[in-house]
Image (cartoon, helix red, strand yellow):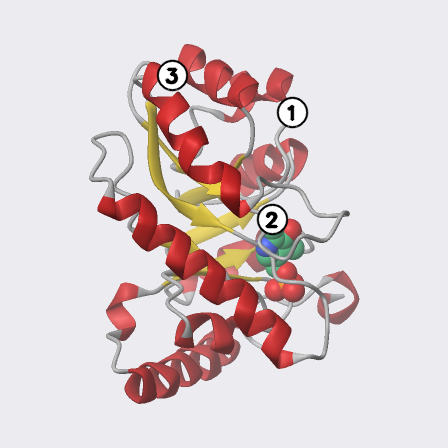
């Protein structure tokens, strides 16, 4: 499938959900997750009109950057090792995986301006998942005040991998509540207006529940096996 066709399908689905939920589709950024695919396929996404691209590893990110003709807005969406911050920091606009103070300290040190960060939350409580427990997020946001280059732009989560829609929905609702809590604090370092949630299999539920950033790989650009 052409990325252009996939994009149209996804945009229509988002528009449908928004209509039912009384939301404006303009509020939702579609991030094409290009970790499975070639730079050529990533370029195809840009040519189709995608502005936001996401990678979860340093190597994948730098490889794409070297081979793309255009400069998309880059989102770093994977677990980030502290020692790798210096290699990616100048290239990315958003970091979706802030989950510890040591990482915040390093981002703060390696940048000379504000970095848009999303706090990764383990909203489902699965042991295998990275991220802070929901109860720990507010305290973490307060602690981040000591790092002037860290802006808490929002929260990010990955829903459990399950067929049970209600479980997924509950996870996204927890996130929306948490976002409201943080916004109500009106902290200068934490506008927190983004909610990064929803992937190929659950982005429609995520949009219904308030997502502003959907991270879509397989359904938009495909994965290696489909592309080759
Ligand atoms: C790979 C990945 C995605 C995209 O997954 P798909 O199911 O292919 O849409 C989204 N978010 C994160 C953090 C990922 O690692």
Q: Would you say residue 220 is visible in this rendering? A: no
Q: Quadrant of ligand 1?
A: bottom right
Earlier-in-chain disc, 1 versus 2: 1
Beta carbon of the mark 3 residue lies under 8 A of ligand 1: no
The residue at 60%/41% (across/down) is 131
- Circle on res. 122: 2
Circle 3 — which element?
A: loop
- Circle on res. 111: 3
Circle 3/circle 2 CB separation < 8 Å: no
Q: Mark 3 against mark 2, which lies toward the viewer?
A: 2
- Circle on res. 132: none
The residue at 49%/81% (across/down) is 5
Horizontal and vertical percent position of residue 108: 40, 16
Earlier-in-chain disc, 1 versus 3: 1
Q: Which residue is mark 1?
A: 81
Q: Is residue 110 above or below residue 157?
A: above
Q: Is residue 65 above or below residue 43?
A: above
Q: CA distance from mark 1 to mark 2?
A: 18 Å
The residue at 73%/72% (across/down) is 162
């Amino acid at each position: 499938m052409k990325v252009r066709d996939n994009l149209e399908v996804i945009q229509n689905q988002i528009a449908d959900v928004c209509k039912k939920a009384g939301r404006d589709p303009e509020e939702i950024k579609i991030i094409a997750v290009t970790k499975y695919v070639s730079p050529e396929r990533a370029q195809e996404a840009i040519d189709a009109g995608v502005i936001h691209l996401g990678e979860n590893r340093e190597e994948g990110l730098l490889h794409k950057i070297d081979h793309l003709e255009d400069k998309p807005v880059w989102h770093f969406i994977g677990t980030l090792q502290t020692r790798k911050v210096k290699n990616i920091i100048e290239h990315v606009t958003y970091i979706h995986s802030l989950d510890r103070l040591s990482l915040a300290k390093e981002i703060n040190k390696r940048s000379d301006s504000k970095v848009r960060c999303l706090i990764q939350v383990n909203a489902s409580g699965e042991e295998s998942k990275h991220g802070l427990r929901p109860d720990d997020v507010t305290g973490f946001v307060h602690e981040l005040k000591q790092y002037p280059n860290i802006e808490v732009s929002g929260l990010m989560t990955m829903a459990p991998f399950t067929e049970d829609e209600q479980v997924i929905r509950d996870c996204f609702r927890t996130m929306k509540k948490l976002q409201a809590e943080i916004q109500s604090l009106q902290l200068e370092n934490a506008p927190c207006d983004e909610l990064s949630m929803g992937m190929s299999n659950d982005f429609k539920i995520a949009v219904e529940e308030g997502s502003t950033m959907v991270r879509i790989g397989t359904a938009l650009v495909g994965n290696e096996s489909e592309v080759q």
